[in-house]
Image (cartoon, rainbow, N blue to C red):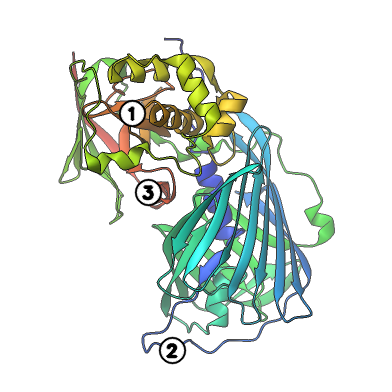
Amino acid sequence: MAKLKWNFTWGIAITLVFLLLLAARLDVFQKKTPDNTISPTIEISRSPESWMNIYQNKNKIGVIHRKFNILDNGRFQTEEFVTMQINTIGVLQVFNVLTETELNPDMTFSSFNFEINSSLFRFTARGYAGKDKLILYAGLPHALQKTIIPFKDVPHISGNIYEAAFRGGLEKDRTRDFSIFDPSTLALRKISVTRQSNEIIPIMGKRVLTQKFCADFMGAKNCAWLAKDGEVLKETGMLGLSMEKVGATQAKEGFTSREGVDFTQVASIPSNRNITAPSKLTEIKIKIDGMRDLPLLLQSGRQYFHKNILTITREKIPDTVSQNNIPAAILKYLQPSPLVQSSAPEMKTQVEKIIIKTDSPQIKLQKIVQWVYRTIEKKPVLSVPNAMEVLNNKAGDCNEHAVLTAALLRSAGIPAQIETGLVYLNGRFYYHAWNLAYIGQWVTADAVFNQIPADVTHIRLAGGEGGEQLDLLGVMGKIKLEVLSTKND
């Protein structure tokens, strides 16, 4: 296997969730108070146009341009355009995110349009809210797939989560839970917002009295400072990221650095031991701290977790069988999804070029993983991983390898999942994505390393191709690893 000269990136998971919390908060639904009544709404006025700079440790890496319009029919229209410059694995990339929303007179959610574009990849999501469900269309601009997400309560939305809390009259030292929708993962999640003490902060050369709110999203903390009219003036988030209101002239100034911080390196975790040949290990024991009470997938399959000690044992490939007898509970992992388009004609055509019908499930898995390993250029990209885009562009990082491998496997009749977590490389553990395939039993597979099974330094923290990956945000920057022991062949 050729030596890889690049690390692994969590890429879009870091940047898009940052946008979710700091900029592109589209679908925040106001929760009823304990007595089942809605808190009194605070009237706000907003400037029709504003700008904010995005910083990483005081270095400008992006800009946000916002528009807020009141329509003749009493509805509201918002538009937000974000440009960010991100360094991942030593490669500097620029990507753009456009978010458009239409709100009813009472600020309830009506519709949205979300687009992200980078040098290679595109992703589009649009949708509207019905009485008890959200109807979504997501994927490539020319091939959007429909998804319906039911709601338990009628959805409400503000321009962002903090305005929802502000308008709802959240009192000092009180906390309220909201439901938030992430268009990049098509997922609904809970987020808690707490009103803190008022603070005076400097903004655009003036000292401004603000209301401070802090949000806890899957363990990741983010805070915002709002003006008396409810406009967000400043926010801070994970990995040293922040944003602040500026004038149009300052917003148009260039980015601070051509290189900037490498987010892949910042998010990685140092190892207390040097592991010389991970692929030869049969077992590893790791002490894990800093996970809080998050719903991580540490216990199942080849992983055993007990009293903060994780033991990972390399699984054995089952004996060759002529056909894959798939239990009913596993059949769902053969189905396509908006990002894993396994039923697309182009995907089926590619599978027919890689395998033959008489191949056993084990041989199909080997051929597909090897094809992805040899064909897809190992290149960091910033976008929502999309199997059809990867098939067309033949490039991507671990996320793109995993989503394409899942689509090809499902198209070949092999149930497949995506796992996310950490992997060891050159003295550190990096956030990474790989696959799980069913060939008589579940087996890990990594198309970046061309490994079946994946080596035991692959630490699964989450699984799934959508919102489940957001579970990692709660441990980013907090999780600590200590390798206790290893066993070789």
Residue 387, percent across and down?
52, 33
**SS state under label 3:** loop
Picture residue at 39% right of the left edge, 87% below the top: 36
Picture residue at 41% right of the left edge, 9% below the top: 1
Instruction: Confirm whether residue 380 shows in the render.
Output: no
Residue to which mark 2 is pinned: 37
Question: Which label sits in the foreground, 2 or 1?
Answer: 1
Q: Residue furthest top?
A: 1
**SS state under label 2:** loop
Residue to which mark 3 is pinned: 475
Q: Residues within 10 Å of mark 1 (few under 14, many from 20)?
A: many
First in sequence, mark 1 or 3: give its number.
1
CA distance separating discs 2 and 1: 49 Å
Q: Residue 414, which numbered label?
A: 1
Which amino acid type is marked by label 1? Answer: Ile
Residue 265, percent across and down?
49, 34
Picture residue at 67% right of the left edge, 82% below the top: 44
Q: Residue furthest right?
A: 249
Above or below 484: residue 116: below
Residue 208, percent across and down?
68, 76
Q: Nearer the viewer, residue 52 or 15?
A: 15
Which amino acid type is marked by label 2? Answer: Thr
Which amino acid type is marked by label 3? Answer: Val
Q: Is residue 51 left or right of residue 18?
A: right
Q: Is residue 306 left or right of residue 403?
A: left
